[in-house]
Image (cartoon, coloured by chain):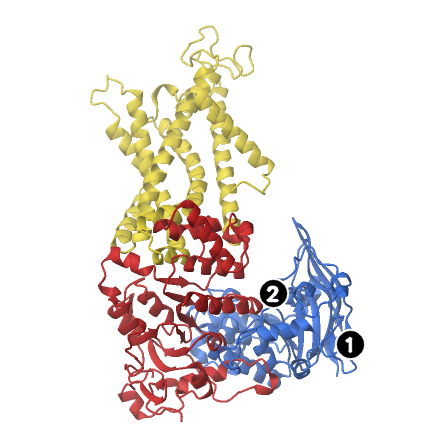
Chain colours: A red, B yellow, C blue
Amino acid sequence: MAGSGTAHMRNTVDSVLTVRDLTVEFRVGNNKTVKAVSGLSLDVVKGETLAIVGESGCGKTTLVRAILQLPPPNSGEVIFDGTDLTLLPKENLRSARTSMQMIFQDPISSLNPRMTVHQLLDEPLEIWDRGTRAERDERINKLLFSVGLEPDLVLNRRSYEFSGGQCQRISIARALALDPRMLICDEPVSALDVSIQAQILNLLLFMKETHGLTMLFISHDLAVVKAISTRVMVMYLGKICEVAPPDVLYSNPAHHYTRALLNSVPIPDPTKQIRTELLQGEPPSPMNPPSGCRFRTRCVGASALCAEQEPQLREVSPGQFVACHHPIV
Amino acid sequence: MFNNSKFTKPTWLSISWLGLMLFLAVFGSLLPFKSWKFVYEDDLGVVPFSPGHILGTDNNGYDLLASLIAGTRMSIFIAVTAVSLGGLIGSALGITAAFVRGKVDTVMSTLFNVGLAVPNLVLALALVSVLATNVDINQSVPTWRRVMVLIVSLTIVLIPILGRIARGATLSWSGRDFVTAARSMGMRDRQIIMKHIVPNVLPALIAVAFLAVGVVIIAEASLSILGVGIPDGASWGGMIARGRNDLEYSPHVLYIPVIFLAITVISTNQIGEVLRSKLDSREAKV
Amino acid sequence: MSSLMSIKNMSVNFDTPGGSLEAVRGVDIEIPAGMSVGVVGESGSGKTVMCRAAMGLLQGSTVNRTGTVIFDGHELTAMSKEQVRELFGSGMAMIFQDPLTALNPVRRIGAQLSEGLRIRLGMSKSDAMARSKELLELVRIPNAAAVLKSFPYQLSGGMRQRVMIAIAIACNPKLLFADEPTTALDVTVQAQILQLLRELREDLNMSMVLVTHDLGVVAGNTDYVAVMYAGEVVEYAPTKKLFADMRMPYTEALLDSIPRVDHKSGTRLSVIAGRLPDPTHRPAGCGFAPRCKYAQDKCTTDHPELKTDPDGHVYRCWFPIGEAL
């Protein structure tokens, strides 16, 4: 694409989150503008896990921060539970945010090193005055149990006494403390060892089922995304390339970028090595993205049309939407 | 911060020395000494370790130990007050600037940089000579007024130094994910600053504050030598200034306060340094 | 097949305030000439320490290394630091995970690249510059002349890693140690760098030790694999053989726990419970026993010996997979 369009929007009443035409730009130095996210739309339906995949600099983290209004986007709508967050006054936004909680990549940076686990988990409950001291303590214990930690052993310890995986469990417990409707995970397992990754991914899947959560899951790791998502959105330079259910996307990618990305993933099986169509070069600067389709400069299927006209998302097979003039069939 | 680590000998010595100084500053007046202003008319310029005068007397007959104890009170009072005020105001400005960012930060940083560009002794000198001198040169300025002006001018000098450190530390801490997490759970900015930023910025600030105490003690002494410090030798700087005149006949009158001052400054630097390296290693672990 | 480097019974201990920390113990590995050997393990498994110790890069009074390391006929463990250093560049070279910290930020790429050539090979300034440009072209850097004049911060992560590779191969080393060379890079750039390393190895007939946590990277880029766990090599075999016929339960568990693009979506991952044993208090038996689904009583009491199958497949397990109890 990477292009624009809204063909992939489902517009159902079940939508928990609807983002329309979201644009985020940063001014840097001498009147240059980084176009981090450009006119992007998406919707997340109740109970699904939408994964946003892309390489560093594609705008995926900026996108979720803008959804949380941290900071707010330059333009566009972010409708969560029927309310447009971009129009909310600060005080209402404060309470609206509690239904969307976030889990971060760096387990250490996401926990204040001066606070004990008890203080960390009590904090959200305290802010919103949820229950008496005894009720809150009981809730904290339950939360810790549910993420597989023994409350008596961890309550009075601080984040630096834990391993990355344990810190991530504490973060998950904290995120669930306010009973959010949606969990936003920003590369939650990228900093963890492979054997710990599986523990945390399974925990997230379990939590999602037991709490009926809707998830937005950002990752650069296509294998992780495949394990956890129910819908995948591929981003390149601030725009959408392709949206599809994981099995369709991974077996029949329609966008040239999706295919190149998939071919780059190392497969732990010496007999299944793909070495064709590796992407060459590196993405152009988001300060000066290419005209038309933003991927055309590295695309094997690019034509003159791709430079002139921006492709719009369209459905190429049931549930699979691609923004490409010459999709792979 | 102090657990699970042993201090080296120099650190213990520094802690003990500062403890002693603090004790003298607080309880010095309760000790069974005659007032430092008492003139031993029969004992002028007595050398140290003489009976009745452990550190000797100066050429005016003032007992040096009594003077030192009184000076400790003044010097420590000025240093601690100036550093506390400077730290409080500086960190309030620095933390706010770094947290709010944008124009506030630009303005504040510029002010800090301007403040740092002014040589601090010159600034203090100018303030003291404007605010703490009488139009009528025959009327002496009350000591308390001199002290106040001295504290104010030293505080002004310290604000940009400590403010910049608070700003830098805040910038690095406010970028951490736990601040974003606190926001997303609906915390107000003021709570975030008090609960998440201040406790993390404070240790760095305290470490620097120790170094600043040393700087202030020296600055106060320098001002005394330049003739705008505390009059009558009621501080270490004042004693040094006065001892200068007796250098030829009673060198100990100069050396003893200099030694006291030097050991104190070395001690604050040592502790500041230890705190800072502890902090660095802790942060590396975090 | 001749062996280029052979590590025999090498152990590395660090003296720490909390006692002696055994980072690597009893490692035996042969690195065949011209081959690529993967060293795979999780963080704390000792893979990086093992490689640095083998190269003689770990120094200081708190490090104790025992055992022998023979490289290309030289017994490194019997040589002085100076003598080992002579072998760097033309014998052994290294690339790192983070090329930004390995490059001097205030010097131009050309200066950093040509310096080694002038010192090592005694080239003149202009010859060294010309050769530097060739090297950058060799690592497929477009517009090499411009890159020679740039500073590290002006290059992307992928480009910096290419520059590091150019510096490493400048003196035609026989053995390249690559320590997580692509971990900090995006997948598409990782694929490019791995491809470059494969091609360079072929062109320069260079052996490589590829340290990584990623079994996928190992599968496609190595001829042999050593799996490390808790400071020990627990399995060593030709790559194809290892993936086709795993003997060590840890390797199997590790492979089962990683999400894969070639599996159906929503597949539950199997989990390795627990975590690595404390390196200051190694358990008496097998280090993996508490986490192993096949563990027997013997595993917790007796430390398993290295066993070798007739086909050269080495593993450290009392009850290897595929063997009836």
Which quadrant of the rendered structure holds the C terminus of chain C? bottom right
Name the residue rendered at 51%, 47% in the picture.
Answer: A156
State which chain disc 1 sits on: C
Q: Do residues under tags 2 and 1 come within 8 Å of each other at their CB atoms?
A: no
Q: Nearer the viewer, residue A240 or C128?
A: A240
Mark 2 / mark 1, whichever is N-terminal: 2
Residue B199 seen in this snapshot: yes
| Tag 1 secondary structure | strand
* A293 vs A28: above or below: below
Q: Residues within 10 Å of mark 2 (few under 14, many from 20)?
A: some
The residue drawn where x is 31% and y is 37% is B156
Q: Quadrant of the N terminus of chain C?
A: bottom right
Chain to which mark 2 belongs: C
Q: Residue furthest top?
A: B42
Residue closest to the far left:
B135
Where disc 2 sits, the SS reads loop
At label 2, the amino acid type is Ala
Choose top left, top right, bottom left or bottom right for residue B221.
top left
- Front residue of A180 and B23: A180
Q: With respect to residue B85, does C178 lie above or below?
A: below
**Residue kind at label 1, given as amino acid type:** Thr
Give the residue number, with chain letter if any, for mark 1: C308
Quarter residue A220 falls in: bottom left
Q: Which residue is mark 2?
A: C273
Report the front residue among A63 and B138: A63
Mark 2 and mark 1 on one chain: yes
On the rendered structure, is C306 left or right of A207?
right
